[in-house]
Structure formats: C-alpha cells, structure tokens
Image: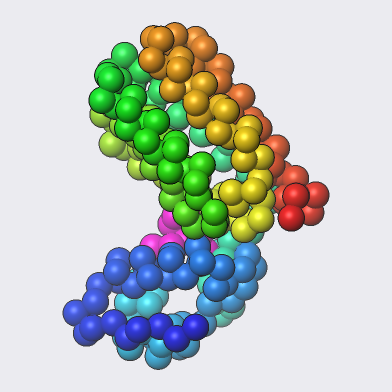
Amino acid sequence: MIATPLTAATTASALAQRLREAIDAGRWQPGELLRQEQIAAEYGVSRIPVREALAQLQSEGLLEIAHYRGARVSRPQAGEIDELFDLRLMVEGDLLARALGRHDQRSLRELVRLQDKLEDADNRLGWISGDIAFHEALYGPAERPRSLALFRQLRAPIDRFNAQALGPGARKQGWADEHRQLIAAIGAGDASAARAILEQHLQATRAVVLAACSGEGDN
C-alpha cells in the first residue's frame, strides 16, 4: 500500500491519524514493527513528526516503543485485558447512570438509527466505528467529556487487537440484542436493568477478547 504524501504543514496529530487508520485497516499486525525511516519517506515528512506521532499512538495504547528497537503494534496480554475491562465497567457504568435520565425521544431515535447501521456493517472498520458511535451516543447525554475521552482510551487497544474476534461476525446477534435491550431499558427509565445489561454486554465482550488472546477465538 502506497501512502499519499502529506504536505509540509502536516502536524504530528494528522500523521498519527493516518497511521491510526492504517493500523485499523490491518496494515501492521499486533507485534509488528513500524520503521520511522519508512514512514517518513512514505508520507513525505521528517523524522521529527514521525517520532511525535508514534509517541501519541503510544499514549493511546496502540503502540509499544522501546529504545533502539522501535515501535510495535500493541498486543494486549490477558492481565491487561482484564484490567481494561474492569476500568471500562466503572467508567461506562458511571456514564450510563448519568446519561440515563437525560435521554429523550430524539436521542433514543438516534440510538436506534445507529444500531440499525451497525447491524448492516459487513467489515471490521465499519463495525468498530459503528459500535463506538453507538456507545458515544449512549453516554453523550451525561456531558462528561473527560470520562468519554477515558472510555475511548480504554477501548482503543482492544479495538485494534484482533481483526477476527472483534469483527462483525463475532457474537453479532448477542451484541445486537444487548444494544437493543439497552435502548429499551433507557426508554423505560429502568436504571437497574440498563446497568445490568451493560455489565452483561461488557463481560461477554471481555470473554471474546480473552478467547482471541489465547488463540481460541472464532476466526
């Protein structure tokens, strides 16, 4: 794949976005090395924005950088996956609780629209972006921008971990059912049901990711 060169005015964040998209598309697999000189030549930039972009992706958990060995796409370990999901349960549970009473008919219709679109996704990138959009709309009424940013940070390493385990074919019906149950519980104003459904949803996702991590995923 040949990248379109970036302009001289390109910032490190713009380059980070291009690299993030390439990782999402599967150009570099977990554990694979990203070479600074290759990226600089391919995108037509100096080594300085490349280093800054790689550092940005490292802060998001997408890359691991070791001195003299370069940057590699992160491969979460089982313990890290458990920790990420424990944190997600806390952060997303709080966001949902704060958002629930602020949803209205318009926001509920938007959740239904996003879920319809998500169920039509037939590729990994479309599915991941659709799932993120659904959850951001689910938590958006909480008006907690820092918590939303933390939500994105916590799920980023998992979203890029395994193309098969987290693609649209992995537990598709279960995820769809849980999303629609969440919408129904929010519409009914049932906070305890919504929290229980979200916890079930995240625990089931944890199991899929751990299975993929151990090589038992559904490929």
With respect to residue 10, does 200 lie above or below?
above
Residue 189 on image: x %, y %? 39, 9
- Residue 167 vs residue 5, the one in the foreground: 167
When asked about the image quadrant of residue 17, the answer is bottom left
Residue at image location 33% in from the left, 80% down from the top: 48
The colour style of the image is rainbow
With respect to residue 29, does 174 lie above or below?
above
Instruction: Count numbered badges in the picture.
Output: 0
With respect to residue 5, does 142 lie above or below?
above
- Residue 13 vs residue 209, the one in the foreground: 209
Image quadrant for the C terminus? bottom right
- Residue 98 vs residue 200, the one in the foreground: 200
Identify the magenta region: 55-63
Residue at image location 66% in from the left, 55% down from the top: 164
Residue 73 on image: x %, y %? 57, 66
Residue 204 appears in the figure: yes
Residue at image location 54% in from the left, 57% down from the top: 123
- Residue 4 vs residue 120, the one in the foreground: 120
When asked about the image quadrant of residue 30, the answer is bottom right
Q: Say left or right for 163 vs 146.
A: right
Residue 140 on image: x %, y %? 31, 31
Residue at image location 32% in from the left, 32% down from the top: 110
Residue 79 on image: x %, y %? 68, 43
Residue 91 within the magenta-colored segment of the rendering? no
Q: Say left or right for 49 vs 185.
A: left
Residue 67 appears in the figure: no
